[in-house]
Image: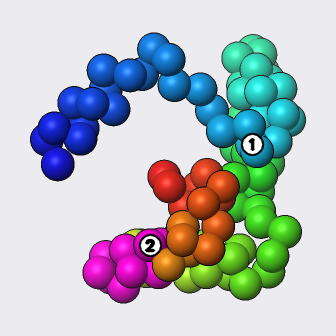
Amino acid sequence: MYVDTLRLVSTLGVRRPAVVLPSRLDQLFQNLTTPGCNAEEIEEQIWQLWMHHPHRRAAAALERTATEIATQLYDIAETRLNNLLRACPDLAEAWN
């Protein structure tokens, strides 16, 4: 795992976000830099984009995983995420 981590860190300069991420994310993150912005509202919009998937089952699995992590059911969450990533490798928040 240490070697894999080093490999990822060494390639940070050439890595780019997934092309399937909504372009609206760029604007939302830019909005966060605006003085007086409603950061809570913008954060909510960002989370909605990250957690969205057009297939309801995938989105529901991601929601269940978030609950499992919050309740420290890490082994169950990891298994669910592995299954979800096999089925939907473009789901960015599942990788996170």
Q: Residue at x 73, y 84 (%)?
A: 57
Q: Where is residue 56 in the image (x, y as percent from the top left)?
A: 79, 80
- Whether residue 37 is visible here, answered yes or no, is no
Give the left or right position of residue 69, taking residue 18 as reference.
left
Q: In which quarter of the image is residue 88?
A: bottom right
Q: How crowded is mark 2: few (under 14 residues within 10 Å), some or many (20 or more)?
A: some
Which element is circle 2 on? helix
Distance from the alpha carbon under mark 1 to that under mark 2: 20 Å
Q: Given the image, on which type of amino acid does mark 2 rest?
A: Asn
Q: Is residue 74 highlighted in magenta?
A: yes
Magenta stretch bounds: 70-82
Which residue does the numbered mark 2 point to in the structure image? 82
Residue bearing mark 1: 21
Residue 6 % position (x, y) = 22, 30
Is residue 74 shown above or below 13? below
Checking the image for residue 29, the label placed there is none
